[in-house]
Image (tube, helix red, strand yellow):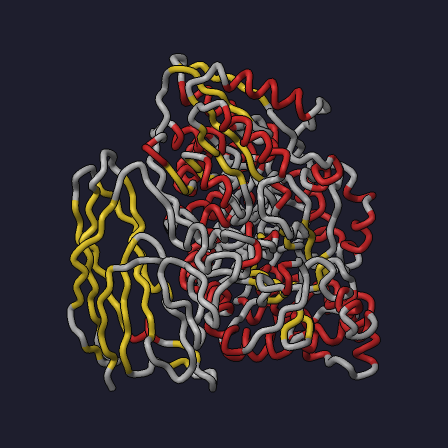
């Protein structure tokens, strides 16, 4: 009798959902709170713990899901979701096990690292941020969601919004650079792109903001290393992008690997509950990073049972791969180390997300084979990716207007990155089909046209050290190492170069020299490539350096010797076309740096929004002064500042004005500047506004970005650009962690990079 009652209640709850006929879709179900509460009441403890378990599937072979190792656990209700499984056929097969063979027929959620595109791949996030174009950035995430959802994925582990000011850290490539304000705008744009303000759509996916928190500030720039900073720095400089993503409605958050205030983030209750939920009002669920719970054992926080209880008590709901929740929480519950209320709350949040995604109404919502055939890697998406990629490239130097190149004569394309399509998508491009990526050689040949002769030589390997190159070309991103001697390769390159009118040197990092667990102590171009470049310069032919990288590099020598430098990051599947579009002037470069390029690795961490010391260097020439804050062997300033980027045209700034020299807390003032295109090309310019709080109750940065506008100006055109400044732009967290704007003087700077020198000022009055 008891079994019959349960079945009747279950049927009432789902109103037909869960039957074997897949045609039973879009079934009406009860409102979320009621539905989830009733479902939760039917679950055993094992089934509850199963919802908190996120294993990796491995690559299941289509047709063999039932015999896979994971199938039994799914049938028994011990799995809440899977990740790293790709394709509608595989996902549908696994989902069928959950909704037809498990007792409660709860659908799985399927996640993947959709970081900067799916099969259509966009520039790495650091490169994407250099567009300074929120519409383009949001559109890139929207296309990624479109493709991923068409292939069965409904959850992405993105965006990564960690502020990073240390280019030694490899994962700087996955974020949006060093700036709090810009990073916050991008965080919102990415969440909006993925979720589209409506998770009920079949082409939107759940965003996951990561890595909460402070992951981008490890000691020594070494991945996973200790992070230790004051709360005032956390709140003012590192927290805002996470909060912006939460405010945008991000459905999930991923805990970081590092410790915060001496406690690993995965087990940090102050971080996950006090800040994230109580202060910011986050309503979604928190997932660990890969094995984040058992890794707390090595941190010295206890055994698997202890660290699993620590994570749940902190406010973590889903355990990625670690299986600590699945295997130990029952014992911890018996020993009163956790409560059933905590477990129920965690399960509720997971079920809420599945409800919001529409999986209870249609567990196969994302398993439409027609969408998989028609919406992935389309010509239209590739065209958008090409245009977006071109906007991300940053022109660092262009002596004597060497660029753009003419579509005539002979071009020598030389370097280990010239014919390296597998590297073009960059790090964390897990869904990309590398064979579809476009190399620089292919792009140059197509864009240059039949009137241009393009010659090619590799010139060097990535590095002299074969073992290093192996480590730097993992995950199928080979550079096809050449076993010839250094002398043979350079001789061939010089021979080719001597036949050309101009040399394009494709040098820098390989895709996997940056990214996770790719920290570097030497930020220069590998010596093998430096030696090649030196020989190319000796030919006397003009040289354009096309610089590939996933981080700011130290290119002081190259900047002194090479007439033109185009920084291209890793621009995605359409990289070759996009780079060629810029090289030949079909697109005028407009990218602006979002991370400072140092002169020396000894300067890092380096960033524009630093604070003054009591003994600042007073001369603007960078000359050493004893007993001042400077280096005895290097200048203080970077090689290229935040916000820097050249164009094929010239932009001049003039006549800065301010609507009032006084502002009270309920007013706004307007700051305007005239921007003129005084060069020979139409172009785009990102006009940037910085504010300095001259006197504060705590020390304040020398300037902070508080606004930007990307404008189009025709040749000879002039435009007045106006910004509104409100009291919100002046607020900061004081020593009591109160978010305040303090009366006093503020200086405003407007220009084309963080060294902007058009200045006005005003006073905030009570």
Inspect this view and state whether residue 317 appears: no
Q: Residue at x 37, y 58 (%)?
A: 621
- Place residue 417 in its image quadrant: top right
Q: Which residue is nearer to you in this view: 78 or 123?
A: 123
- Furthest residue in direction front, as rendered: 626
In the image: residue 5, left or right of residue 669: right
Q: Is residue 23 left or right of residue 406?
A: right
The residue at the point 50 percent across, 74 percent down is 233
Q: Where's the C terminus, which quadrant?
A: bottom left
- Give the percent coordinates (x, y) of residue 192: 44, 55
Query: Which is more toward the observer, 403 or 90?
Result: 403
Vertical side of 730 occupied by 412: above or below: above
Is residue 682 shown to the viewer in this render? yes
Q: Which residue is drawn at 47% across and 86% down?
A: 736
Of 614 and 440, nearer the camera is 614
Q: Where does residue 481 sit, x and y in percent of width and height?
A: 69, 28
Q: Quadrant of the N terminus?
A: bottom right
Residue 418 placement (x, y as % from top left): 55, 28
Residue 421, horizontal then vertical, whole percent: 58, 30
User: Which of the 4 image quarters holds residue 678?
Assistant: top left
**Which residue is painted at 39% across and 40% down in the image?**
397
- Above or below, 552 against 376 in this view is below
């Amino acid at each position: 009798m008891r079994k019959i009652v349960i079945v009747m209640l279950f049927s009432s709850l789902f109103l037909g959902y869960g039957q074997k006929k897949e045609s039973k879709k879009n079934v009406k179900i009860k409102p979320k709170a009621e539905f989830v509460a009733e479902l939760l009441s039917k679950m055993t403890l094992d089934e509850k713990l199963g919802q908190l378990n996120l294993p990796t599937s491995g690559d299941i072979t289509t047709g063999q899901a039932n015999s896979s190792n994971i199938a039994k656990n799914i049938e028994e209700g011990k799995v809440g979701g899977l990740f790293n499984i790709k394709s509608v056929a595989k996902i549908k097969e696994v989902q069928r096990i959950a909704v037809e063979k498990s007792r409660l027929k709860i659908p799985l959620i399927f996640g993947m690292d959709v970081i900067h595109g799916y099969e259509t791949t966009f520039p790495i996030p650091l490169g994407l941020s250099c567009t300074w174009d929120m519409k383009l950035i949001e559109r890139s995430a929207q296309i990624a969601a479109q493709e991923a959802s068409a292939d069965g994925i409904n959850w992405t582990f993105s965006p990564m919004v960690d502020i990073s000011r240390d280019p030694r850290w490899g994962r700087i490539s996955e974020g949006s650079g060093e700036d709090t304000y810009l990073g916050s705008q991008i965080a919102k744009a990415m969440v909006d792109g993925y979720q589209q303000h409506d998770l009920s759509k079949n082409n939107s996916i759940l965003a996951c903001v990561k890595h909460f928190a402070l992951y981008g500030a490890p000691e020594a720039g070494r991945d996973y290393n200790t992070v230790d900073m004051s709360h005032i720095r956390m709140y003012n400089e590192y927290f805002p992008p996470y909060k912006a993503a939460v405010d945008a409605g991000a459905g999930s958050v991923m805990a970081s690997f590092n410790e915060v205030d001496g406690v690993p983030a995965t087990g940090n209750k102050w971080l996950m509950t006090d800040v994230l939920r109580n202060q910011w009002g986050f309503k979604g669920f928190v997932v660990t990073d890969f094995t984040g719970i058992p890794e707390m054992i090595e941190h010295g926080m206890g055994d698997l049972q202890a660290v699993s209880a620590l994570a749940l008590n902190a406010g973590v709901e889903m355990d990625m791969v670690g299986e600590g929740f699945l295997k130990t929480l029952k014992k911890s519950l018996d020993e009163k180390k956790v409560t059933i209320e905590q477990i129920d709350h965690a399960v509720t949040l997971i079920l809420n997300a599945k409800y919001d995604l529409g999986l209870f109404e249609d567990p196969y919502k994302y398993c439409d084979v027609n969408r998989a055939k028609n919406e992935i890697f389309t010509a239209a998406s590739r065209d958008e990716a090409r245009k977006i990629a071109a906007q991300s490239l940053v022109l660092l130097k262009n002596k004597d207007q060497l660029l753009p190149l003419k579509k005539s004569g002979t071009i020598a394309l030389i370097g280990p990155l010239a014919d390296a399509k597998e590297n073009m998508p960059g790090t964390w491009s897990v869904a990309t089909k590398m064979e579809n990526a476009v190399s620089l050689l292919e792009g140059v040949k197509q864009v240059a046209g039949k009137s241009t002769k393009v010659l090619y030589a590799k010139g060097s390997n990535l590095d002299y050290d074969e073992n290093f190159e192996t480590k730097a070309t993992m995950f199928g991103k080979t550079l096809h190492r050449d076993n010839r001697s250094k002398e043979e390769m350079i001789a061939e390159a010089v021979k080719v170069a001597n036949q050309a009118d101009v040399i394009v040197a494709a040098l820098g990092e390989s895709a996997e020299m940056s990214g996770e667990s790719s920290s570097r102590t030497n930020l220069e171009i590998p010596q093998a490539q430096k030696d090649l470049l030196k020989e190319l310069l000796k030919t006397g032919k003009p040289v354009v350096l096309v610089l590939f990288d996933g981080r700011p590099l130290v290119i002081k020598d190259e900047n002194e010797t090479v007439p033109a430098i185009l920084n291209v990051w890793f621009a995605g599947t359409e990289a070759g076309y996009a780079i060629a579009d810029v090289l030949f002037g079909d697109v005028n470069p407009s990218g602006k740096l979002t991370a400072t390029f140092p002169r020396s690795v000894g300067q890092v961490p380096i960033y524009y929004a630093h604070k003054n010391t009591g003994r600042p260097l007073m001369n603007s020439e960078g000359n050493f002064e004893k007993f001042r804050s400077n280096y005895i062997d290097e200048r203080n300033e970077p090689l290229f500042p935040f916000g820097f980027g050249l164009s094929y045209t010239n932009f001049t700034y003039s006549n800065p004005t301010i609507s009032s020299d006084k502002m009270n807390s309920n007013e706004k003032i307007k700051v305007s500047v005239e921007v003129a295109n005084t060069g020979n090309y139409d172009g785009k310019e990102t006009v940037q506004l910085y504010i300095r709080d001259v006197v504060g109750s705590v020390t304040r940065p020398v300037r902070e970005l508080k606004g930007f506008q990307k404008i189009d100006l025709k040749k000879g055109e002039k435009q007045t650009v106006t910004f509104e400044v409100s009291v919100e732009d002046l607020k900061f967290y004081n020593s009591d962690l109160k978010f305040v704007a303090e009366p006093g003087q503020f200086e405003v700077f407007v220009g084309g990079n963080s060294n902007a020198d058009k200045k006005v000022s005003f006073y905030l009055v009570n």
